Amino acid sequence: MEREVRVWDNLKRDTEERMKKVAHLVEEGKVVKAENTVALLEGVIKPGDKVNLEGNNQKQADFLAECLCEVDPKKIYDLHMVQSVVSLKSHLDVFEKGIAKKLDFSFSGPQAGRLADFVRDGKLELGAIHTYLELFGRYYADLVPKVALIVAFEADKEGNLYTGFNTEDTPIIVEATKFKQGIVIAQVNKIVDKVPRVDIPADWVDFVIQSPKNFYIEPLFTRDPGLITDTQILMGMMALKGVYAEYGVQSMNHGIGFFTAAIELMLPTYAEELGLKGKICSYFALNPHPTMIPAIESGWVKNIHCFGGELGMEKYVAARSDVFFIGPDGTLRSNRAYSQAAGHYAMDMFIGGTLQIDKYGNSSTATANRVAGFGGAPNMGCDAKGRRHSSDAWLKCGLEYGMQEALLGKMPRGKKLVVQMQETFKEKMDPAFVDELDAWKLQKNANLDIPPVMVYSDDVTHYITEEGIAYFHKCVDMKEKMAAIRAIAGYTEIGLQAKEEETMDLRKRGIVKTPEDLGIDVTRANRSMLAAKNIKELVEWSGGLYNPPARFRNW
Amino acid sequence: MLSWDELQKAKFTEANARERAFGLVDKGTFTEFVSPRDRMPSPHLPVLGEAIGYDDGVVTGIGLIGKRPVFVVSQEGRFIGGAVGEVHGAKMVQAIKLALKAYEDVKVKYPDSYEERLPAVVISFETGGVRLHESNAGLLAHAEVMDQFQDARGKIPIIAVIGSKIGCFGGMGFVGAATDVIIMSEQGRLGLTGPEVIEQEMGKDEFDASNKALVFRTTGGKHKYIMQDANFLVEDSVAGFYQQLQEVMKLPFAEIEKFRRIGSKKLVEEQLELVKLAVGLGAKDSMDVWKYYGNEDPAKLVDMGPDEFLKVAKRRERKLG
Amino acid sequence: MALNELNFKYKVENPQSIAKEYSHLGVVGSGDLEVLMEKKDFGGGAEVKVVTPVTGFDKVWEMVVTKFVKGNNLGDLLIEINDNNATPVVVSMRLRQALAEANKIEKGGE
């Protein structure tokens, strides 16, 4: 039989060719001078390439992002950007300038409004909005980057990188790019003789550039306890008694909002009083939240794995290696992909705030004119269908699952607790419960395939408002679910449709519990419940190890 | 409301105006003047469709510290930023007037022992100054309060207590500075123009209002203490301020007079020298000034707890005749 | 532009007034309110006066207040609320706290 002669290393040859074109820009080792960055990018990137620009809700390869905006759009165009986050102005400027054309991403934050405009005006072709893990997965399938523009704290001349506290997405991007014959370019704050620890080995990195300014990091997970309201405290007490204690939840992920900050600050106070120490909250997939300090210091927490770092928490985390994941060099290594995997498969509960809840119990943070994306929340906030290990909390929730028999017959199976918290009215009497989510308007405005829903009704197990907890998973059908939503929707239009006898029946059957049903004294819901009442007290709890960023200091 | 004992342990920054008024005098001795039950809201706010409060954002009343009657004024920062309107201002003025009347009465009633029974005025500032909704009345109130201070001079001490979230700014910054004694916590802030306004007028290079740490370093209690603008620095608790007030009450009036920063030719000269220094030093940060006054490692002072700070901080030396 | 004033009157079975002659709670901060409760000889009735800059939610106010007065069998009582854009949850919570405060038995020396 005759075989056709075929070339099997086209990708490699292509890369080698590109590398040759820019060889003259390389100084010692793999170092390229900052002023040659644009030339480097023009040399290694070709029109139509898939390019990954590193950045997430914390650290940003901001210098490389700005340089990419400066390449000649006549030479480089039609790029397909695959990146976790669109949050810097430059992330969209590349589309404005005609350098990039298509975008696949996960989360957009501050640029969400402009992104929606770009999509509507046809300046940008939107691939899809993902969760982090989903997007990471596609880096290894149909969205493999040809060039990755990444960021690290330090590099040596050979290209070993130290990403340290903010390792975050770097390993998963680099591995996808480099092992598919791509090109990896790193901006670093400093080129040093020896990095404190090798987070990315030198032979996975092609170029290192010392950026003129340190890269930007957003302290996204710092919540000032001074801003926590009595209502958030009340709902935190309800969550602790009605969910954490009720199920004995030991492993979990917390959202980034004030509800969970309040809960974290009530572990050493209210939860301690309820005798829950050791029975709940031992394991977390969580960024180093400053509001966790009092609970950690009081001996509540066994283990925290971090998606990313948090500004100011470096020294504290390093000094608590029994709790956090600390490298041989003595600093934290975060890793978004692993933490997302832990959050999805190893945690019994996800709990966090939302913005809007529809009459069916779908929950969304989308607003009509902002394509904000998802980040990691939907991946945390869903039942992991592939989960096979059991735990008490997971089993109990599964046993209570009202649709279990309809779906599985007499087969026992657990269920992850997915808890969504929201006051019935937001500021200015804006109702949280709505007939139709704003996600539908956004779908129209931004031409999306489906409305972007953060957590679907079939994944939510508990809704908490100040009116009560709906043990949503206990409902046997959508009709009952809708009644449970109405029962806790207070004085919103949805809540006003609640029928008293229906609500009484749900309460009798434990599907809805009010603060009174839970035995909570509402008059105790005030700030004296908080283990720390301001940032300064968090510093005190940490023994001076926590060093909050200037914007959070009121001393 | 928390009991007096619970209040003593509470953070001063967490306490509302009424709680502060109760907690700054001896247990069980506070009586409120024109309390909410007397329903004395601003007559101007309803016309503008703005929310009203029955105390118009200030609690006034009388209590005791030891044998001395203490007239308390306590502003509520959560009500329109503690801004001074007509009723609010009138309540402040009237409290000081009553203190002056009490001074005369005490002298008549206890001719031999009046010194240990002399009244005092304590003002717990939490305000941005004039309430813009009723600015004429508010401005007038500032002048009237200053006027009362003049009448009280040499008779009864006026003591400023500054440790609440909003601080003491705007026109009330002048009023605060014109008191006899100033007690602050490091969370307390005292100044004239707010940080945002300075940034807006002079640019971010002059003052970066988003840099909260810088804002607090420049206007906060520690800086004011080093500069001798604040006479005492206490911890952020109601007890911290109450106990310091007890100490101040033990001092004879001659000592109290020495705490003043303005109010005589000599003091004005001292202030003018400070202005010269500010220009000459070209300080970019309050820490530069701390260093100038002999604090070798000023950055260390920033995070230091009040006890340790008081032990090690070097202050500007005052030239008192 | 003027403030919105709402008045409600109630008559419940076996009404209960408060322990103190009068009681006050809360601060009219943004999103918050103050509650003044005063014992009154209303022949068993209860009266509630709300002053708020908010318009368009009179029905919600009535429901929140009604639930509170009826749920606690209140009578011979005047309740006055000065509001600054509080949500229903804050209103109910402050009302409950105010009632607890109004029924606190004073201990000696305070």
Image: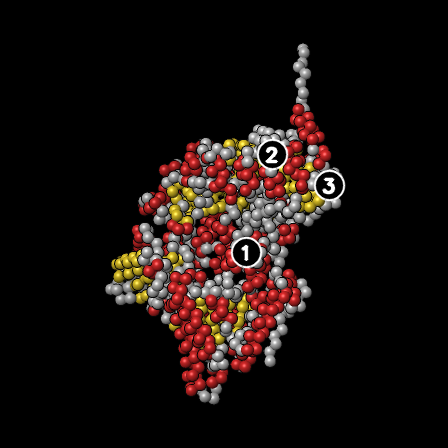
Tell me the CA gap for discs 2 and 3: 28 Å
- Judging depth in this view, the residue of B318 and A169 nearest the camera is B318
C-alpha gap between disc 2 and disc 1: 36 Å
Query: Label 1, on which residue?
Result: B203
Residue depicted at x 62% and y 62%: B283
> In the rendering, at what x and y percent does residue A88 appear?
55, 42
Amino acid type, label 1: Gly
Residue at disc 1, secondary structure = loop
Q: CA distance from mark 1 to mark 3?
A: 41 Å
* Callout 2: SS: loop
Q: Is residue A378 above or below residue B199?
A: above
**On what subunit does the disc labeled 3 rest?**
A
Q: Quadrant of the N terminus of chain A?
A: top right
Q: Residue furthest top?
A: A1
Q: What percent of the width, then of the height, locates residue A398?
A: 48, 39
User: Image quadrant for the C terminus of chain A?
Assistant: bottom right
Instruction: Specify the amino acid type for callout 2.
Output: Asp
Residue C50 picture quarter: bottom left
User: With A150 as the anchor, is C57 left or right in this view?
Assistant: left
Earlier residue among tags 2 and 3: 2
Mark toward the viewer: 1 or 3: 1
- The residue that disc 2 covers is A72
